Amino acid sequence: MLLFGRQRLLPAVSGFVILLLASSIHGASDSLEGLNQSYKIVQPLELTPKLSLQLKLHAFLLWSSVGFLMPIGVLLIRFSSNVKSAKAVRVLFYCHVAAQVAGVALATAAAALSITNFENAFNNTHQRIGVALYGLIWLQPLIGFLRPDRGVKARSVWYLAHWLLGVAVCVVGVANVYIGLHTYRERTGRSVGLWPALLTAEVSAVALVYLLQDRWNHVVRQEEAATGDERRSETETSEESLSYPANDHKEVAVMP
């Protein structure tokens, strides 16, 4: 009954999010048409101390969300697939859920901050990508909650969709953080300092761990296979050594 309810709820929720994105994009396009011609050229941004603090907080929230917590959540759930202890699997799963929920909460706070305090003309790439990204971020935990039970045919389809959407949110989110830093420098004329380099170092470290996970799994499987071969070889050797004294005894017994 619960599975049936989930299957009926998922299309409804997905349709709602799609309609929300479509209406947001349509509203943005309408507002662009009504803008003055001068807005087509990016205007310099008058940066007050309050606005500067709000922009920095917005950037920090999104960086922490899509640039750190969500990628860490992906790594945690990948680690759980190679853990044999059921308790460890549960711990990693709940850590994955906690990281994703915290990431969604921070992204929601960043969205609320931008909607209430920034000009939402949607006349730059950062804002347009941000609208679509928020919709994907909110859709991802709903898909995770509505996962089918194990053994159901839809489970594999759900797993592929959940994995692809999670990776897409991380990749697009990190790209939009870079775009946001560029937009900030372009609109304010101020340097962003070492922040792009720090973001690159952090993303590179996460990507390296992500890639090494498969290699590490391969190494572990090879070691397990080698250990199994050694054990089988030792067992065969011990069996052969036990059979030799019996044969020798028989040979001695028949000697005149």
Image (spheres, rainbow, N blue to C red):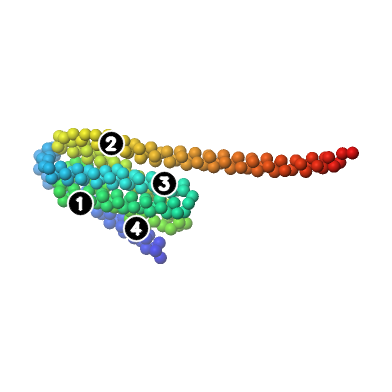
**Quadrant location of the N terminus in the rendered image:** bottom left
**Disc ID at residue 10:** 4
Q: Are marks 4 and 1 in contact (CB under 8 Å)?
A: no
Residue on which disc 3 sits: 78
Q: Position of residue 6 (x, y in %)?
A: 37, 60
Residue on which disc 2 sits: 198
The disc labelled 2 sits on which kind of residue?
A: Leu
Of the two numbered discs 4 and 3 on the same chain, state the one appearing first in sequence: 4
Residue on which disc 1 sits: 112
Tag 3, which secondary structure?
helix
Would residue 238 be found to the left or right of residue 33 on screen?
Answer: right
Q: Distance of mark 4 from mark 3, alpha carbons?
A: 24 Å
Q: Residue sitting at 28 percent across and 45 percent down?
A: 64
Q: Position of residue 96 (x, y in %)?
A: 37, 50
Tag 4, which secondary structure?
helix
The disc labelled 3 sits on which kind of residue?
A: Arg
Would residue 42 be found to the left or right of residue 215 on screen?
Answer: left
